Image (cartoon, rainbow, N blue to C red):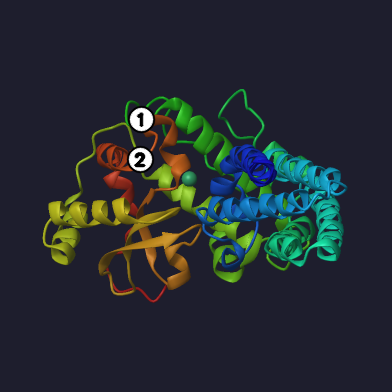
Amino acid sequence: MKKFLAYTIPVILSLAIGALGSYVQSPSISSWYPTLIKSQLTPPAVVFPIAWTVLYILMGLSIGRLVALGDMSVVRLWLMQLLVNFLWCVAFFSLRSPLLGLITILILVALVFAYTIYSFSIDRIAGWLFIPYLLWLLFATYLTGYIYLNNPTTATLSAANAPQSSITIPQSSTIYTVPALPYLSGALEPVMSSETIEYHYGKHLKGYADNLNRLIVGTPYEGMSLEQVVTSTDGAIFNNAAQMLNHIIFFEGMTPEVVAIPKRLESAIVRDFGSVELFKEQFTDAAKSLFGSGWVWLVEDNYGKLSIITTQNADNPICQGLNPLLVLDVWEHAYYIDYRNRRSDFIDGWWGIVDWQKVEERAKFSPSPEF
Ligand SMILES: [Fe+2]
């Protein structure tokens, strides 16, 4: 019985702290974290809870093995690393401070390294059980260091999440400014609530603009148009610039007015999709089946042909030489306040607020050497 408890108590304790850490991390994992590093370095959000669950179980089994062997001397060190692990979640993901995150994860790595060395000297299996955790932490340390060196200060990052009294975005002292909404924040209700607009437009989009304005200073991209930045960069600058551009197209493409599809646009849609209904059906299917965070676009190629494409994370069709006409944001933050996980309901409602006039204005319709 004692042996059983020696294993189960630390495993349960690890998983409990892990669950708490995941709860702290989750809002940032889905919206903030992917904007900070190259998409190739960002594991899909679903990887985090799976990886951490496995690591916490191994972590608990490791100390359980030492306790079962009668060695209690290292329990304090084990508990301390567990506590620092949680503090790292808070510092980096909740407070969104790359500096505090880097400091805490370096302390964590030192503690875990010390524990691993010690456990190897007592029991090799207990040591090996900690190795995956140590490797994961080293990778996380690299990413945290990368973010600290390549991204805005804590103050800027925190400002992106600070509550705002109004959704009017300050336009002073910034290079890239967010256009004012062409409608009031509550005008798209009930499809899109004012609360969603306040968060999505007032915080997320503003956050991307603030990050970009901070990141761009002193780089060769300073002074370029937003489109030029998107097609010339990668990493954090690209992520924030592309997310800014994507969101501007998204917010400009909606209206509280009932707008019929202009004839010229309608003809092009019928020509390339068979009918407006078939186009909507295909677009809706793409939006419903897009896995993870991304965008669904109606785009126009160099010859004026229309098609539907999807992009992941921050990618924009201009990177593929395509002209974006209409976009639907299917990142969870676009609909979670109003629809929770019911993405389908959000998509169905969104069709009723599309500004078809704006979509037509973005189209060039004929072969154009310009893009
Ligand atoms: Fe969004």
**Mark 1: which secondary structure?**
loop
Which quadrant of the view contains residue 114?
Answer: bottom right
Disc sitting over residue 254 in the figure: 2
Which residue position holds label 1?
Answer: 188
Verify CB contact (< 8 Å) between mark 1 and mark 2: yes
Q: Nearer the viewer, residue 34 or 208?
A: 34
> Can you tell which quarter of the image residue 151 is in?
bottom right
Amino acid type indicated by mark 2: Met
Placement of 196 over or under 242, stated as above or below: above
Would you say 255 lies left or right of 200 here? left
Give me the residue at 78% from left, 62% from top: 218
- Residue 252 in the figure: left or right of residue 357: right
Q: Looking at numbered disc 1 in the image, what kind of residue is underneath it?
A: Leu
Relative image position of residue 144 (x, y in whole percent)? 74, 57
For residue 186, which quarter of the picture?
top left
User: Tag 2 or tag 1, which sits nearer the N-term?
Assistant: 1
Packing grade of label 2 (10 A; few <14, some 14-19, many >=20) is many
Depth check: give the residue in front, 59 or 310. 59
Q: Residue at x 18, y 53 (%)?
A: 281
Question: Which of 288/268 is in front?
Answer: 288
Residue 347 vertical placement versus 106 (above, below): above
The alpha-carbon separation of the residues under discs 1 and 2 comes to: 8 Å
Q: Is residue 222 visible?
A: no
Q: Is residue 97 above or below residue 47?
A: above
Residue 244 in sight: yes
Residue, far bottom: 369
Q: Position of residue 76 (x, y in %)?
A: 85, 43
Closer to the camera, 234 or 168? Answer: 234
Mark 1 is surrounded, within 10 Å at the Cα level, by few (under 14), some (14 to 19) or many (20 or more) other residues, namely: some
